Image (cartoon, helix red, strand yellow):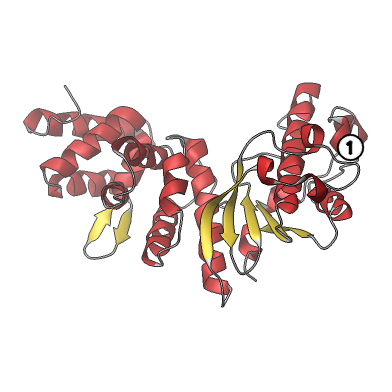
Amino acid sequence: MTPRRVGRDGRRYIQRHFVKAHERGEVSTDELSTVVKRYDSLDADERALAQQSMSRSGDDGIRLLETDVCNSPCDSLLKSVDDFADGRSELDADEKRKLVDAFEDSDGVSDDVPGGDPEQVQNNLEYLADEGVDGLDGTIGDISGDRNGYTGLAGEVKTAKRVVENQNDADVEMRRDVDPDDIADEDIPDGLTRSDDFKAGTTDIDVNDRNGAAYESKNNVEFTPLYDDISAYRSVGDKLDELRRKLNTIAASGQDEIVIVMREGELESEYSDDVTNAFPESVQAVERPTDLADMVEDNFDGVSVEFRSYEEVGS
């Protein structure tokens, strides 16, 4: 049966899927009743979308079908995301599909980080669209259609929304490109080189306030070793060095106010000597992620670098 089969057989397929999830204890009786009733209320196209989600993402699709986004009238989150994507004329069909796919992979994101509430992520997208924020479609179009793409998007749109809401003169654009080839040699501080200290190719500023700071969102990057092993330590060191290169590139491009936005728990990471000994030499002095701010500020006169949690953005 294909995902677009929406007749009697399609309803049986969806019901079997719901019942199996209930039997596994992944959906409560009340939740089962809600999603079955909602499915019955959908039109043919909406049922096809629900079946496609069930086929691809299993219980993640149930979660989205269960959740309401109450504009007028209340829609399931799954339908709301699909409608939002369809309304973005600058997105091609593949980019629209990736946005829906990314939301379908939202289950399992911790409740206390950006993306833990998929409804809020969708509301943030709608808010930025209503505000006419430049570059929103480029941000959406660049994501991968999976959980990593979803969490990255969640962090960026939360950052952008908080800047727009809390900075009176904010003029926000998303995904402003920065090309290292445009940086003049005289703008590179003594002791730094293009090959060792800057991004190799074009990078971007996630959220740029034309009247204020450049914001780099790191919602989908772990700066804490996942386990006690030298390979995990090296992975963190490589991520820190990648961030160092990007901050140097942004600073040399003329941006004098930079804010790195991270999850609260990542901001509090501290590294022992055993961990830092596995880091690249360029970041072996880093004992916590926030130390990168001092490194960049020491190299660039007049540049301010701050680390903030998502809740602190705009405050």
Q: Quadrant of residue 2?
A: top left
Q: Quadrant of residue 163?
A: bottom right
Task: Tell me residue 257's x, y (percent).
Answer: 72, 62
Examine the rendered structure and indicate whether residue 8 appears above or below residue 256: above
Which residue is at a point 83% across and 44% down the rendered structure image? 270
Task: List the single residue furthest toward the bottom.
Answer: 168
Note whether residue 106 is visible: no
Q: On the picture, is 246 further left or further right than 300?
A: left
Q: On the picture, is 129 further left or further right than 226?
A: left
Q: On the picture, is 192 further left or further right than 259?
A: right
Which residue is at a point 15% across and 41% down the rendered structure image? 45
Give the quarter of the figure containing the N terminus: top left
Q: On the picture, is 209 further left or further right than 69?
A: right
Task: Tell me residue 114's x, y (percent).
Answer: 54, 52
Task: Tell me residue 255's x, y (percent).
Answer: 70, 58
Examine the rendered structure and indicate whether residue 186 appears above or below residue 93: below
Amino acid identity at mark 1: Ser
Note whether residue 170 is visible: yes
Give the quarter of the figure containing the C terminus: bottom right
Question: Which residue is disc 1 drawn over?
Answer: 272
Which of 244/264 is in front? 244
Local SS, label 1: loop
Which residue is at a point 33% across and 33% down the rendered structure image? 21
Task: Tell me residue 174's x, y (percent).
Answer: 52, 54
Q: Label 1: how many residues lie within 10 Å, few (<14), some (14-19) or many (20+)?
A: few
Which residue is at a point 75% across and 50% down the rendered structure image? 252
